Amino acid sequence: MRSAHTVEQVRAAEGALLAELPAGTLMDRAAAGLAAAVVDLLGGAYGRRVLLLLGSGDNGGDAAFAGARLARRGCAVEAVLLGSSVHEAGLAALRAAGGRVVPGGSSGESGPRSRPDVVVDGIVGIGGRPGLRPEAVAELERHRGVPVVSVDVPSGVSVDDGRLVGPHVTADLTVTFGTHKVCHLVDPAAAACGAVELVDLGLRLPPVDVVALQAADVSSLLRTPGDTDHKYTRGVVGLRTGTAYSGAGLLSLAGAASGLAGMVRYAGPDEVADLVRAARPDVVVGAGRVQAWVVGSGGGDAAGEDLATALADEVPVVVDADGLRHLPEELPAGTVLTPHAGELARMLGVDRAAVEGAQLEHARRAADRWGAVCLLKGRRSLVVAPDGRAAVTSTGVPWLATAGAGDVLAGLVGALLATGLDAFDAAAVGSWLHGAAATLASAGGPITAPEVASAIPEAVRRLP
Ligand SMILES: NC(=O)C1=CN([C@@H]2O[C@H](COP(=O)(O)OP(=O)(O)OC[C@H]3O[C@@H](n4cnc5c(N)ncnc54)[C@H](O)[C@@H]3O)[C@@H](O)[C@H]2O)[C@@H](O)CC1
Ligand SMILES: [K+]
């Protein structure tokens, strides 16, 4: 599991460790890891040109000490000072190792002599306010096209919530220390991190609020059938979907009928039921006892009625698409809402851009408002529980942004709920598997929603 901590948690853990260790130990560990990552990226050290962008805090200190290590290994290291002050010990170490300070600025004459092979962004770290000063923006602009390694976080991003609220660095690689921060996992900031590498500092950290499941976590959460299981003990998932748009109904069914639950029931309108009978002999048509319902996908105006009927059964419910327009004031614990950014914006009465810019905040608002798990679909879908816990989905490919993919996801989450997973785990595991299935189906090329559904069993088979 990848875990992300807040700045406050990191500071507390660092403080405790700093008190036990000789001065400079943590920064030395950070700088060693950072220098090694830069050498890896460059494919060597000797003769490589490294440009450090140094701000005034310890983030710049990390970069300067790493620069000293790189200079000792034969890199030509230059530094531009962008802060009102500089980490003096770091700068002294850099100079002693042969690194030199060069003026910044937009003119080629006053700056570094030749194009660097890498820019190391030590402008600000976890102590930074979001945004960048104009000098920093100009300096970054000047080296556009050169790979950027960010120290701890891409400078300028909002570290604790993953927002982007002003100019920021867009990194190829971010080398972070001690633990992941929220901005490494949550979009849109996560998209600015590039690849993320974690350097262990030996911090003792508290439990986390934001995680990203890995394959092994999914494997241990997934309920696999035992010798004594039969179809009913494995769980029955029911669908009241496709009332207005039969295609969406069939796709939610395809997601639900991927073999994870013991049985799938379709309880939608007769016209769609006829299609279901023809397409899916494994699906039982007609209402009956279920352990979880899926409603809303392709539901149109009837989705409100479908939702009310499902809720009356007092089993967990996945509410998708049109169902999200008919939410009652309060929902029972165990409900999963699956909006995309536009739907969540409508639910909360805000602009879509506001949701896209602050995804964690808005998903948390919805989870809190309705007392339900909110699965906000996006490049890195977010699953948030009413108590604020969040799981970020790290699987998937851009090709997954295709019509009907959300219907498949709703069905899949419903099937997982029916197997007995709680709402948070069902949504997190479902979202992870959905992304993994998309990656398998895509194999680098375009995909359609039915192909994603068909690849779910293979995604499960490949779990460790
Ligand atoms: N605390 C520790 O024990 C460790 C900290 N480490 C490093 O220390 C960093 C945190 O250092 P600091 O607390 O000194 O803070 P930062 O280096 O993140 O930045 C704070 C400084 O930047 C200025 N600043 C704030 N926002 C700015 C902006 N938008 N543009 C320009 N300047 C801005 C502030 O005035 C302050 O001088 C971490 O990110 C990490 O890189 C590592 O060395 C590991 C150990
Ligand atoms: K940085």
Image (cartoon, grey):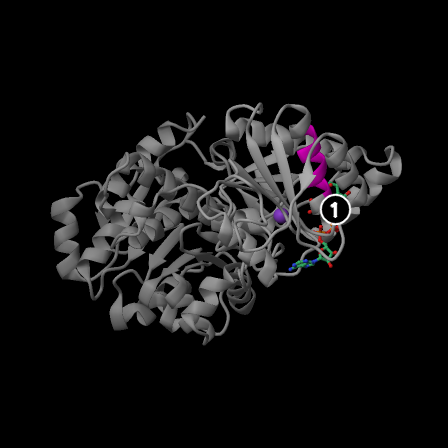
Part of the protein shown in magenta: 61-69
Please report the residue visible at 54 percent of the width from the left and 23 percent of the height from the top.
Answer: 44
- Element marked by disc 1: helix
Please report the residue visible at 18 percent of the width from the left and 59 percent of the height from the top.
Answer: 246
> Image height check: is 446 above or below 389?
above
Query: What amino acid type is highlighted by mark number 1?
Result: Asp
Depth order, front residue of 394/197: 197
Residue at the limit of the structure toward the front, as seen here = 109
Q: Can residue 259 be seen in this view?
A: no
> Image height check: is 453 above or below 243?
above
Q: In which quarter of the image is residue 395?
A: top left
Q: Quadrant of residue 234?
A: top left
Residue 322 lies, in percent from the top left, at 32, 67
Residue 191 lies, in percent from the top left, at 47, 49
Residue 150 lies, in percent from the top left, at 58, 44
- Numbered disc total: 1
Relative to 420, 177 lies left or right: right
> Image height check: is 220 above or below 142?
above
Relative to 50, 287 lies left or right: left
| Residue 383 falls within the magenta-colored stretch | no
Depth order, front residue of 241/235: 241
Q: How crowded is mark 1: few (under 14 residues within 10 Å), some or many (20 or more)?
A: many
Q: Label 1 belongs to which residue?
A: 58
Q: Quadrant of residue 28?
A: top right
Residue 379 lies, in percent from the top left, at 40, 51
Q: Is the residue at mark 1 in contact range of ligand 1, meaning its CB lies under 8 Å from it?
A: yes
Q: Is the magenta stretch mostly helix, strand or loop?
A: helix
Quadrant for the C terminus in the image: top left
Depth order, front residue of 349/310: 349
Quadrant for the N terminus in the image: top right
Q: Can residue 246 be seen in this view?
A: yes
| Residue 64 falls within the magenta-colored stretch | yes
